[in-house]
């Protein structure tokens, strides 16, 4: 027997570290697939919202908003109670700046919800879709104006084309396209406030806090509508009542799916998947709800789509460059002579 260890015959056995790395890569790929699926589900549900809100007629936009706030709060409270996850509330209440930010965020998303439902109920779902097509461009512009972020050249091109689309829509239509602009800016500002103030809260905590801040307003709305005899909650059958109650579940589920997706997939992927929502909204409005989109508006959509194509291409290139830089690792210092 020789003193040295004998070499194994055939192909070398894999090292334990190699197996661990392979398992980690497989698990990471599975997480990305799950995250992508969650993202498509979330944006798909949001894209089908026009059908749900149209089914809530004859309830008006403000009644739907009030029920959506209160039943969403009820869903959040139930989930948090089952999970015994209420200890964070005291910490939030003790931070006045956070409470103010949550309240502002709640008011912005409430405005967004109201205008969106109003657009659907008045046969203008296509304008709501245009608003959500404009939203990524508005978000980029807000990053420059408010946060002082620097844009890459193609991002500037996309913002310029988006501004051109807004001017075209105003000139061609004869009026300011207020529904798309309010939807795009309210949601863009909502994201900005969340980034500045409320990013420390998980999705469920944030939704619970925002709806809790809005709940007094929702109660007042329902009381006023009740005094005017304008509520529909109990006067239009059990099906109508059930749909209003389920608005809480319908609101919470896609948000939680989105949160699960955002933890698993790159931001670039999230940004590209988000276009599922306005595409579905436009398709639902035109094909299922029978809305008529004028030729001038189709031109406006075309201009916006060019801007989004530029923005998406820039995001893909930037994401690819970042991944390549991470794989290359830190630059090695030049040897001294």
Image: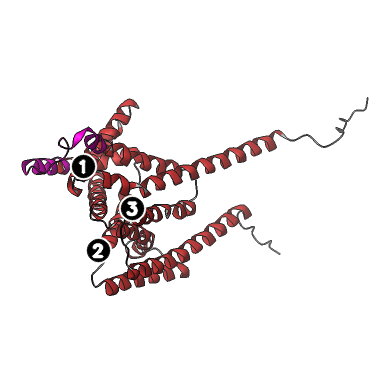
Q: Position of residue 231 (x, y in %)?
A: 13, 41
In the rendered image, the vertical position of residue 310 relative to residue 90, given as above or below: below
Residue bearing the label numbered 2: 178
N-terminal of the pair, mark 3 or mark 1, is 3
* 2 and 1 marks in contact (CB < 8 Å): no
| Closer-to-camera residue (236/100) | 236
Nearest to the eye among marks 2 and 3: give it: 2
| Residue 223 drawn in magenta | yes
Residue 213 disc label: 1
Name the residue: 38% across, 71% down.
Answer: 160
Q: Name the main secondary structure of what is drawn in magenta.
A: helix
- Quarter of the image where the N terminus is located: top right
The magenta span reads 218-244
Chain-order first, disc 2 or disc 3 = 2
x 26%, y 40%: residue: 209
**What residue is disc 3 on?**
191
* Mark 2 or 1, nearer chain start: 2
Q: CA distance from mark 2 to mark 3?
A: 20 Å
State which quadrant residue 206 falls in: top left
Magenta region includes residue 124: no
Locate the C terminus by quadrant: bottom right
Element class at badge 3: helix
């Amino acid at each position: 027997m020789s003193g040295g260890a004998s070499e194994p015959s055939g192909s070398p056995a894999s090292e334990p570290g190699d197996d661990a790395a392979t398992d980690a890569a497989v698990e990471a790929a599975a997480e990305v697939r799950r995250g992508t699926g969650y993202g498509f589900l979330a944006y798909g549900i949001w894209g089908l919202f026009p059908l749900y809100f149209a089914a809530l007629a004859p309830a008006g936009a403000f009644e739907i908003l009030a029920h959506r706030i209160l039943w969403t709060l009820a869903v959040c409270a139930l989930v948090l109670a089952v999970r015994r996850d209420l200890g964070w509330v005291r910490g939030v209440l003790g931070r006045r700046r956070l409470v103010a930010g949550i309240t502002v965020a709640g008011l912005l998303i409430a405005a967004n919800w109201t205008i969106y439902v109003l657009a659907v109920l008045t046969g203008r779902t296509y304008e709501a879709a245009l608003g959500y097509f404009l939203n990524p461009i508005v978000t980029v512009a807000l990053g420059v104006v408010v946060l002082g972020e620097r844009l890459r050249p193609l991002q500037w091109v996309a913002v310029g084309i988006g501004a051109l689309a807004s001017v075209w829509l105003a000139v061609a239509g004869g009026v300011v396209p207020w529904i798309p602009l309010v939807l795009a800016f309210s949601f863009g500002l909502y994201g900005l406030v969340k980034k500045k103030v409320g990013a420390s809260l998980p999705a469920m905590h944030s939704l619970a806090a925002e709806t809790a801040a809005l709940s007094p307003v929702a109660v007042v709305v329902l009381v006023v509508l009740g005094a005017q005899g304008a509520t529909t909650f109990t006067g239009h059958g059990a099906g109508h009542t059930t749909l209003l109650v389920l608005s809480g579940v319908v609101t919470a589920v896609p948000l939680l799916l989105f949160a699960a997706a955002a933890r698993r997939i790159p931001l670039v992927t999230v940004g590209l998947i988000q276009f599922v929502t306005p595409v579905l909204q436009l398709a639902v409005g035109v094909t299922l709800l029978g809305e008529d989109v004028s030729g001038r508006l189709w031109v406006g959509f075309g201009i916006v789509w060019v801007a989004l194509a530029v923005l998406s291409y820039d995001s893909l290139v930037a994401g690819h460059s970042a991944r390549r830089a991470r794989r290359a690792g830190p630059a090695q210092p030049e040897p001294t002579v």
